């Protein structure tokens, strides 16, 4: 889990929208993409983004 105060400062790298913590990933509800969380570190790089629609 990402600290809630830190999560408020973070934004989607594509649209700058808010992110939600879903345990194993962060989710942008605007872009419908996810960022994996590994070892308590969100991997927010283009190569690691995954589509939540499919």
Image (tube, grey):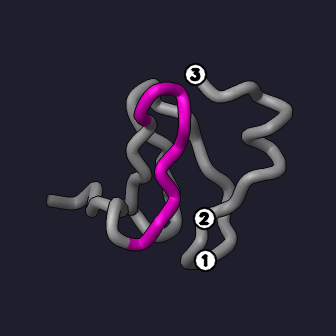
The numbered dot on residue 12 is 2
Badge 1: residue crowd in 10 Å (few <14, some 14–19, many ≥20)? few
Q: Where does the magenta region start and end? A: 38-46
Please, what secondary structure does the residue beneath circle 2 have? loop
Q: CA distance from mark 3 to mark 1?
A: 22 Å
User: Residues at badges 2 and 1 in contact (C-beta under 8 Å)?
Assistant: yes
The part of the image, by quadrant, that contains residue 3 is top right
Please tell me whether residue 13 belongs to the stretch shown in magenta.
Answer: no
Q: Quadrant of the N terminus?
A: top right
Pointer 3 or 2: first along the chain: 3
Mark identifier at residue 30: none
Q: Position of residue 12 (x, y in %)?
A: 60, 64
- At x 59%, y 71%, the residue is 13
Which residue is tagged 3? 1
Where does label 1 land, which residue?
A: 15
Quadrant in the picture for the C terminus:
bottom left
């Amino acid at each position: 889990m990402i600290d809630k105060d830190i999560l408020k400062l973070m934004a989607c790298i594509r649209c700058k929208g808010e992110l939600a913590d879903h345990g194993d990933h962060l989710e942008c509800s605007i872009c419908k993409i996810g960022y994996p969380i590994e070892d308590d570190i969100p991997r927010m790089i283009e190569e690691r983004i995954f589509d939540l629609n499919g």
